[in-house]
Amino acid sequence: MIALFVLAACVLPGTEKEEQTTGAGDYAAFCAACHGASGKGDGELAGGLDRKPADLTQLSAKNGGAFPATRVMAQIWGYTGGKDGARVMPKFAALLDGTLVPYDGGDGIATPTPVRLVELAEYLKVLQK
């Protein structure tokens, strides 16, 4: 009888644990196919794209040694739609759900931002050469 109650507790509404995500995990799931596992723009789908994916390992180098967090966040969140809204990168709706946290990308403005986007941006800092 006790085992039955323990088993029932595993499936009762409201007892599910929130999915644990990481920037590295989301990068692997949503970005690596185009940008490559190491971020160099050489993912398995890169060859079939009209435009070569960015080498994400060079973002800081191309920005005077500073990670361009605000520009990165604008790109992954979808603020930058390109000419006439033509966006190269897909929108990642799954990353927009969930908790919002204040994020200052270096411009002094703490903007409520989905935590998974923050984790992803922070992971991109690790890839810098």
Image: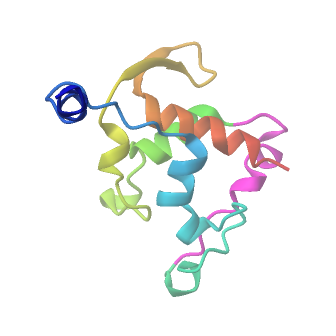
Please give the count of numbered marks on the rendered protein: 0
Which color scheme does this rendered protein use?
rainbow
Front residue (pair 9, 94): 9
- State which quarter of the image contains the N terminus: top left
Q: Does residue 66 lie above or below 58 as drawn?
A: above
Position in image of residue 13 (x %, y %): 13, 29
Residue 99: x and y, percent?
35, 24
Residue at 31% from the left image edge and 59% from the top image edge: 84
Q: Is residue 38 left or right of residue 5?
A: right
Q: Start and end of the magenta stretch?
A: 51-67
Q: Nearer the viewer, residue 26 or 92?
A: 26
**Magenta highlight on residue 73:** no
Q: Main secondary structure of the magenta part?
A: loop
37 and 4: which is toward the camera: 4
Q: Residue 55, relative to residue 44: is it above or below?
A: above
Residue 84 lies left or right of residue 2; in this view the side is right
Which percent across, then down, holds residue 126? 75, 42
Q: Residue at x 58, y 80 (%)?
A: 44
* Residue 71 place in picture, x, y as percent: 57, 39
**Position of 34 relative to 5 (above/below):** below
Residue drawn at x 41%, y 42% is 77
Judged from this view, the residue extending furthest toward the bottom is 48
Q: Going by the image, does 46 lie left or right of 111? A: right
- Hey, which quadrant is residue 4 in on the image? top left
Q: Tell me what residue is drawn at x 59 percent, y 25 percent.
A: 105
